């Protein structure tokens, strides 16, 4: 047992895409700062960031219908979509900067161009999609989007989905070619390799057990070395909690006022993965449908071409599930353990409010493989059960908190940063759009936690992220320039037409 205290500047908890992004930004902005990373598992990007644990969509709101809500007057609100698109552009700029600085060797190891499509059926949905298309195509960020309700055109775009379709219901789709497939697991591993070269100390198989304030205002982090069994104590000026579903229990341990009255609700996911190369070859795109009534927004069904281990694959899902674990490798006591005197009423209120979600999750958990195949057949009418296997995806812990407009115990479906008033600790909670907007979310952490450095860092940030602090919607020329230069740096151009 060693009780030695070891000092450092920054501690990052969790070796996922968020810590990888924050660490990489800090190494560019303050190369002299000492950074330590603690990860419970044996390697980087094994939980939510892992390529099999998320949808791998570069979320830019090109195809996700839940980012464009229909207003009571029938018009479509695209403000959330433009915001997410602008945030994704920052990620593209940062990755491009890393490529140009030779810190990432081959962008194809983690990002590929792929058309993003939305597909709906039924008269009402078709009319919504058309209105959405009209609202978005007038916006510079969504230029190049096409809409079609012509069956022949749809057969060209999505032959696998159209083959054997007998329903006479109206169908429509939108398509935009500037979409991407991102392997966040590979990206996370690349970034951690780069951090290692920059002398960042990365400790795998080290589980953080506790966080306490010391008398001199530092954070003392109690770490369990899983292999040796030793307990170590590390102190730092700043701690970032980026442990995916494991972040909430650690945030609660900090005792900061901002951690009170926040709960978490874990939702697990399953994907179906095609094992038949002939079927995989017939589809090229990420095709998002509409969530069923009562279903949470993260359960929107989609059929995705993915590139994993440099091989083309085809996934359908996600099917939601429920497990009381906060991480795939977590404990069945996680959910109960997260209920504290300060959040019990928030949690109970959410339970009462979200009866339809609870019912939906129970139904999803009870689905047999055949029932799942039936849902898949709504997308691929000729799907054969033997061509598809089931993969369990990652756990997502949705944030529950009291909000002004939603009242007590409101379930949040976004990504959220919680930080101490003095900026000494920050945690990332929540799920989608998550990894796609990692750069924007980590900039928010920097702005909140290091306000005294932002002025001196600004020039470097602008070098890495030309659209930092600029609205791309209001600067269409800059957007076009950035889209073209990042597409070139990330090698997204000439691949647009290659279906391999």
Image (cartoon, rainbow, N blue to C red):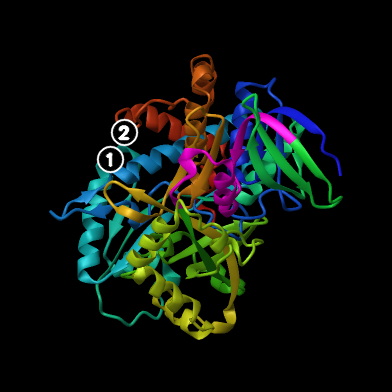
Marks 2/1: CA–CA distance: 7 Å
Residue 50 is marked as none
**From what the image shows, is residue 400 above or below residue 283?**
above
Provide the secondary structure element on which disc 1 rests: loop
Q: Position of residue 401 (x, y in %)?
A: 40, 51
Which residue has dot 2 on it?
473
Q: Are marks 2 and 1 in contact (CB under 8 Å)?
A: yes
Q: Quadrant of the N terminus?
A: top right
**From what the image shows, is residue 441 above or below residue 457?**
below
Q: What residue is shown at x 63% (from left), y 57% (from top)?
A: 308
Residue 139 is marked as 1
Q: Is residue 238 magenta?
A: yes
Taking the view exactly as shown, the residue that stands out farthest to the top is 456
**In this rendering, would 390 be left or right of 287?**
right
The answer to which of 431 and 130 lies nearer the viewer is: 431
Provide the secondary structure element on which disc 2 rests: loop
Q: Is residue 429 visible?
A: yes
Q: Position of residue 493 (x, y in %)?
A: 51, 42
Q: Within 10 angstroms of label 1, few (less than 14), some, or many (20 or more) residues?
A: some
The answer to which of 151 and 404 lies nearer the viewer is: 404
Q: What residue is shown at x 48% (from left), y 69% (from top)?
A: 320
Q: Position of residue 353 (x, y in %)?
A: 33, 64
Range of residues picked out in magenta? 234-262
Q: Is residue 109 visible?
A: no
Snapshot quadrant of residue 218:
top right
């Amino acid at each position: 047992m060693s009780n030695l205290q070891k000092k450092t500047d920054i501690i990052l908890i969790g070796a996922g895409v968020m810590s990888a992004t924050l660490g990489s930004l800090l190494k560019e902005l303050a190369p002299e700062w000492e950074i330590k990373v603690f990860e419970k598992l044996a390697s980087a990007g094994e939980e939510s960031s892992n390529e099999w644990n998320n949808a791998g969509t570069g979320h830019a709101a090109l195809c996700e219908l839940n980012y464009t809500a229909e207003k009571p007057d029938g018009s479509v609100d695209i403000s959330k979509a433009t915001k997410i698109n602008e945030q994704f552009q920052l990620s593209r700029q940062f990755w491009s900067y890393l490529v140009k600085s030779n810190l990432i060797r081959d962008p194809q190891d983690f990002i590929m161009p792929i058309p993003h499509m939305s597909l709906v059926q039924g008269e009402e949905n078709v009319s919504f999609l058309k209105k959405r298309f009209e609202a978005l195509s007038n916006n510079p960020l969504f230029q190049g989007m096409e809409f079609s309700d012509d069956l022949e055109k749809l057969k060209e775009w999505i032959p696998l989905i159209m083959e054997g379709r007998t329903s006479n219901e109206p169908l429509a789709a939108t398509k935009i070619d500037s979409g991407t497939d991102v392997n966040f697991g590979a990206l996370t591993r690349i970034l951690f390799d780069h951090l290692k070269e920059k002398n960042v100390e990365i400790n795998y198989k080290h589980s953080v057990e506790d966080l306490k304030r010391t008398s001199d205002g530092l954070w003392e982090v109690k770490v369990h070395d899983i292999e040796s069994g030793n307990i170590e104590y590390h102190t730092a000026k700043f701690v970032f909690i980026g442990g995916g579903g494991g972040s909430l229990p650690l945030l609660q341990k900090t005792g900061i006022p901002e951690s009170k009255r926040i709960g978490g609700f874990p939702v697990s996911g399953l994907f179906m993965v095609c094992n038949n190369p002939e079927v995989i070859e017939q589809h090229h795109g990420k095709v998002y449908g509409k969530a069923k009534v009562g279903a949470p927004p993260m359960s929107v069904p989609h059929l995705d071409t993915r590139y994993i281990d440099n091989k083309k694959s085809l996934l359908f899902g996600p099917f939601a599930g429920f497990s009381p674990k906060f991480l795939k490798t977590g404990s069945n006591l996680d959910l109960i353990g997260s209920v504290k005197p300060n959040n019990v009423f928030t949690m109970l209120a959410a339970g009462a409010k979200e009866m339809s979600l609870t019912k939906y999750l129970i139904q999803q958990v009870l689905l047999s493989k055949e029932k799942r195949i039936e849902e898949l057949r709504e997308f691929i009418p000729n799907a054969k059960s033997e061509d598809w296997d089931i993969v369990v995806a990652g756990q997502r812990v949705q944030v529950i908190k009291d909000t002004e407009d939603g009242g007590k115990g409101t379930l949040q479906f976004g990504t959220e940063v919680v930080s101490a008033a003095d900026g000494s600790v920050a945690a990332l909670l929540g799920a989608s759009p998550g990894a796609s907007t990692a750069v924007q979310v980590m900039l928010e952490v920097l702005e909140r936690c290091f306000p005294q450095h932002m002025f001196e860092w600004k020039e470097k940030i602008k070098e890495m992220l030309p659209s930092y602090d600029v609205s791309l919607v209001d600067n269409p020329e800059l957007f076009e320039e950035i889209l073209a230069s990042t597409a070139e740096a990330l090698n997204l151009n000439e691949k647009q037409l290659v279906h391999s």
